[in-house]
Image (tube, helix red, strand yellow):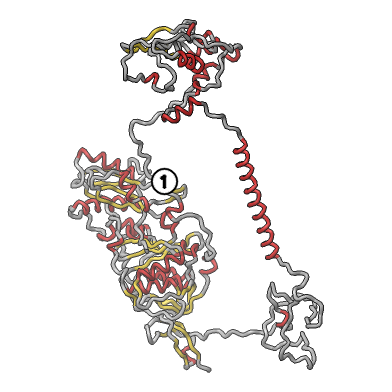
Amino acid sequence: MEPFTIHCTTCQSRIRVKNPNMIGQVAQCPKCNSMILIQPEPKVTIEPTGVPAADSSALTKEGIVTNLPLDQTGADTSGPAADPQLAPPDSHDSGPAEPTSAQPQWSPSSDQPLVPDQWSNPKTAATRMYLLVGFVGLASTVVAVLLFVAFLSSQEKRPMQPTERQALAAGDDVDPRLSDDVPPADGGPLDGIDTTDAADGGTAGVDEAASTVADAEDAAPNGSAAGTEDPATADLPPDVPADTTAPVRDGANAVTRGGDGASTAEGDASNLPSELPPELVGDAPGAADPIAAAKQALPNERLREFAPMLDWRVQPTLPDVNVDLGPPPLTAEDLGIADQPSDRAVSDVDWQRQSQVVITGVILGDALPLAHGINLWTHLSGVPTVVDFDRYRAANMDLHRRMAPIKLTNMTVAEAARQIAAALGLEAIAKENRYLVFQPPSAMIQQASPESIAVDDLVQDESKASLIAALESAFPGTTDGWEIRQGALHRVQPLVDDLTWFSACRLLETWRVVEGRPRRLDSIAPANLDARLPRVDELQGLDFEVQELTAEPRPVGQLVSLVCGQAGIDCWIGWPDTMATGLGPSTTQAIVTFRRPLRNILREVVSHYDLVCAVLDDRSVWLTSPRAYRASPQWFVLPLGGRTAEQIQLELALLTPVDDEGVRRIDVVLPPGNSVAWVRCCYATVEFP
């Protein structure tokens, strides 16, 4: 027998086998003491296909101009032409070459130009098209802007009147009624203007006021105090005499300004301009109601029906107090569950076919942590395997236990899975014909479930009804399923199943721990009853410096389990869900681990496969897909600390769960006592910078 070399699946050490009797046997690795199967690796042979190889000179690149002069220096043109059918025996056949037309060779005496007639190609044609379209668009924009500027400059502007220039010089607003080009209605003198000489002199000023002001009265002074300025005449030009007795028209009434103040009097129709309709005069009927006056002024009965629309006004209203709309709702992008197709997705496993694969010889265990052993079994069998955490805790089993060595020899994958599950006190259940779940049987959960739990130290007699209402709110569908007898809480079966009952016991027992009370339920391990929300700072070992040396690509699941185990952390992997992101049982990757912190290694794996690193407790992490993470919320007990349910929801917004209907709100239930809150949310995650 010719000696051959094999590799250890755990430490990748090379082992040379010289004894032919060792073939097919299971032996220990001299370096890491792992059990390996001694089997020569199959040799790769290449059979001749019988197809003649293609001429390598026919393989050309796109875009090479064949009409350019070729360098013939050193070429041997005296020998016979090479036969295209004759090719080296080791040449690679890449298929039939594309037919090419013979191109004439260039010579200095030839009149053929250096650049061929077909000088364009698709790239240059596309470039010219883009340049043409851009130039036409830019030219059109420039022409449109020039035309618009020319149009604006061609518009005639109304010349400014002298009164407007004086008002602008004084810094006042220009009254359009003071324009010099407003003629009287009848072409003669304005009605209501007395052109006689005023006592203060200046008939010219009165005449000028008569030609510019349509609603002024007599320009005689009435003894107003000198040096005082009437607000009603402040805006008039200096050449217009101010008349303190001129009525100011406001609707149908006239306010007459006198020396002793303002008095109200009915308007005089004779003093109104001739342009106003008689219906709007103060003495006319309906003048007090503008809508009625408008109806009478309209010539058509049909038009009078639309008169109320003339008085329609928009009156915006503002709230008296500020309205807090709250934070914007979370989106799928915020939670990392947006549907993003992954080109690295691993195809699902067919359990019916994979279960019939025969395992010749494997030994699992060697005091490995349970999480590491499950990941190793997933790699060896090719079947994604997970553990049901909720049922595992309800059966009062330890997630941090270690596996005893299990020898698997000449059995199918299905038989090996049942043997491993039986050794762990579990049962292997196939789900969706694509993955396995190791879970304790229902009888074990019923045996571990307590009959009742004491609540006399948590609530008073008058608060028992409130406690039952809180439990019914936390666990929908359990109405009339809770009873409090003799200071203890009991369940009514089958309204409350085993897992719901265990979750309620966890909430009540953790409630005691948060308030500093002694434990009352001793039949279940404290770690399984701890429902406090794990914090990232409680996870020890993230800054551990790994000493494992990896020189070549290795299975990702085994490598992550190995480096986490060195830091004292159990790494659980949600294999059925990570396959959608590209991490499968046989996925390998070259990751540098020597003298690197565990945090950096996990960050590289999480970012490469788009995973979430959730914290299960102070010694366990869970790598899974973002969607599976959001679909696995748990009930936790948090100290209330004077906060409201809305404040807790805002603080834990990033832990919002998601179900089949979409993004949900974080459920917060306040039990009696106002000391703790029951919160249903996702696990905390390790955020990598």
Q: Which is nearer the eye, 118 or 143?
A: 143
In the image, residue 566 above or below residue 217: below
The quadrant in which residue 386 appears is bottom left
Residue 62 placement (x, y as % from top left): 69, 73
User: Dot 1: few (<14), some (14–19), or many (≥20) neighbours within 10 Å?
Assistant: few
Residue 45 placement (x, y as % from top left): 61, 85
Q: Which is nearer the eye, 448 or 308?
A: 308
The number of discs equals: 1
The quadrant in which residue 257 appears is top left
169 horizontally vs 492: left or right: right
* Residue 437 seen: no
Instruction: Tell me the amino acid under the disc marked 1.
Output: Pro
Q: At x 74% / y 77%, what residue is drawn?
A: 66
582 horizontally vs 420: left or right: right
Q: At x 49% / y 63%, what residue is drawn?
A: 581
Residue 639 placement (x, y as % from top left): 24, 50
In the image, residue 317 above or below residue 5: above
Instruction: Classify the position of the C terminus by image quarter.
Output: bottom left
Q: Which is nearer the eye, 232 or 577?
A: 232
The quadrant in which residue 597 appears is bottom left
* Residue placed under numbered mark 1 in the picture: 329
* Residue 339 seen: yes
Residue 661 placement (x, y as % from top left): 47, 47
Q: Which is nearer the eye, 165 or 652?
A: 165
Mark 1 element type:
loop
